[in-house]
């Protein structure tokens, strides 16, 4: 209903008429993409800034890499092709990539893996170093998928809890 | 709508910035933000202790904290009306009180950059209006006002220029304010809201199949 009128060119009487004429027929498309893990991306504790309980603030060092930017370019072109093929009149195309962290899907930093040298958690989100520590949130991710991560977080958590219960029953934890 | 030979804004602005420096005094240009901020401070100083009194009524607090001066508010009204004018179909941005919407949005914004864009933008619009029309934007005719905004609209991709940034935000907020107002939704777009369909007529084939 609400016309995305800012993207229509121009202003004034003709602008107003154009929006009125085409109202209800506007359509837009955005794209999501996977973010690969990069060695250069990490979080650490701020040596200076602390919260009111004296806990150091978390600092994010996080940038998209070449693959993400190339994918964004491809998404833009593909979306444009689809709209053109469908016969839409294209008003506005943008390849703006949202700032890193904008989606608030914090994932990774304690990635899972088989090798304790290159990962923090094992396949059950259990710490390699501290056996009775399980990190059952998004920290175990090795990338940031193109989907919203909540269901995957829940599935992994479920699986890890089953394992945890099983290990406890066997008195192995 | 746009001129056959769109004005080269980057060329032109050198001229009008130069004229503004001589007309307004050289001190204004190097410190545009500080100068407009001083203007902002004036009306706030008039009601004594209105802002620091916790018991001040909502209306008083609001009036004391307004972002635009009365003159700036009038300018914003005319700017928004130039973006979305009244026509035979419905009222324009002025009737829809878009300037009040913009006032509140900018005042409550946590983005200092946006506030600067508006202070600086309103100043530059005046400078441009003086350059192109020889009079203030508010005193100019609708055609003369369009001529000023047309320059910015034709150069809308020069986002590094503060006046273009201002134009983009002005248009964005005018569209938002207007089409979320009663006039914008009901009069202009004739939105009827969610209504129960007594009968679903569908679309397309004008002659229904006879079975």
Image (spheres, rainbow, N blue to C red):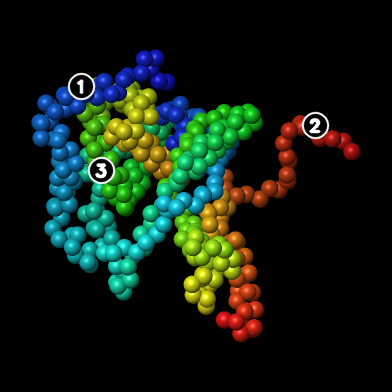
SS at badge 1:
helix
Q: Residues within 10 Å of mark 3 (few under 14, many from 20)?
A: some
- Residue B68, horizontal then vertical, whole percent: 25, 45
**Quadrant of image for the C terminus of chain A:** bottom right
Residue B156 as seen in the image, left or right of residue B119: right
- Residue B16, horizontal then vertical, whole percent: 21, 24
Of label 2 and label 1, which has the lower sequence position?
1
Q: Residue at x 25, y 50 (%)?
A: B66
Of label 2 and label 3, which has the lower sequence position?
3
In this figure, which residue is indicated by the disc labeled 3? B116
Q: Residues within 10 Å of mark 2 (few under 14, many from 20)?
A: few
Q: Chain of mark 3?
A: B
Q: Are marks 3 and 1 on the same chain?
A: yes
Above/below status of A145 relative to B10: below
Distance Cα–Cα, label 3 vs label 1: 23 Å
- Residue B109, horizontal then vertical, whole percent: 32, 51
Q: Chain of mark 1?
A: B
Q: State which quadrant residue B155 falls in.
A: top left
Q: Are marks 2 and 1 on the same chain?
A: yes
């Amino acid at each position: 209903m609400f016309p995305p009128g800012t993207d229509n060119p121009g202003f004034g009487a003709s602008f107003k008429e154009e929006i009125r004429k085409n109202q209800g027929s506007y359509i837009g498309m955005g794209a999501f993409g996977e973010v690969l893990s990069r060695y250069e991306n990490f979080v650490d504790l701020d040596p200076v800034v602390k919260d009111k309980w004296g806990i150091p603030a978390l600092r994010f060092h996080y940038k998209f890499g070449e693959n993400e930017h190339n994918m964004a370019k491809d998404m833009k072109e593909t979306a444009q092709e689809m709209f053109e093929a469908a016969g839409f009149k294209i008003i506005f195309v943008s390849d703006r990539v949202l700032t890193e962290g904008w989606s608030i899907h914090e994932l990774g930093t304690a990635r899972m893996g088989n090798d304790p040298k290159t990962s923090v958690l094992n396949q059950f989100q259990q710490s390699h170093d501290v056996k009775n520590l399980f990190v059952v949130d998004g920290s175990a991710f090795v990338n940031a998928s193109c989907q919203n991560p909540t269901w995957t977080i829940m599935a992994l958590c479920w699986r890890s809890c089953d394992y945890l219960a099983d290990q406890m029953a066997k008195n192995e934890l | 709508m746009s001129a056959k030979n769109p004005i080269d804004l980057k060329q032109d602005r050198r001229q009008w910035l130069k004229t503004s420096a001589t007309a307004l005094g050289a001190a204004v240009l190097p410190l545009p933000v500080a100068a407009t901020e001083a203007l902002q401070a004036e009306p706030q100083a008039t009601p004594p202790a209105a802002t620091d009194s916790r018991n001040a009524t909502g209306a008083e607090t609001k009036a004391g904290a307004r972002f635009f001066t009365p003159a700036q508010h009038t300018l914003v009204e005319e700017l928004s009306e130039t973006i979305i004018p009244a026509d035979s179909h419905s009222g324009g941005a002025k009737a829809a009180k878009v300037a009040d919407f913009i006032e509140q949005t900018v005042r409550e914004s946590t983005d200092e950059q946006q506030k600067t864009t508006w202070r600086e933008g309103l100043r530059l619009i005046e400078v441009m209006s003086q350059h192109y029309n020889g009079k203030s934007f508010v005193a100019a005719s609708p055609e003369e006002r369009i001529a000023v905004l047309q320059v910015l609209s034709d150069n809308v991709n020069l986002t590094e220029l503060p006046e273009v940034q201002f134009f983009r935000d002005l248009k964005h907020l005018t569209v938002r304010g207007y089409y979320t107002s009663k006039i914008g939704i009901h009069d202009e777009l004739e939105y009827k809201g969610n209504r129960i369909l007594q009968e679903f007529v569908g679309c397309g084939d004008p002659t229904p199949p006879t079975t």
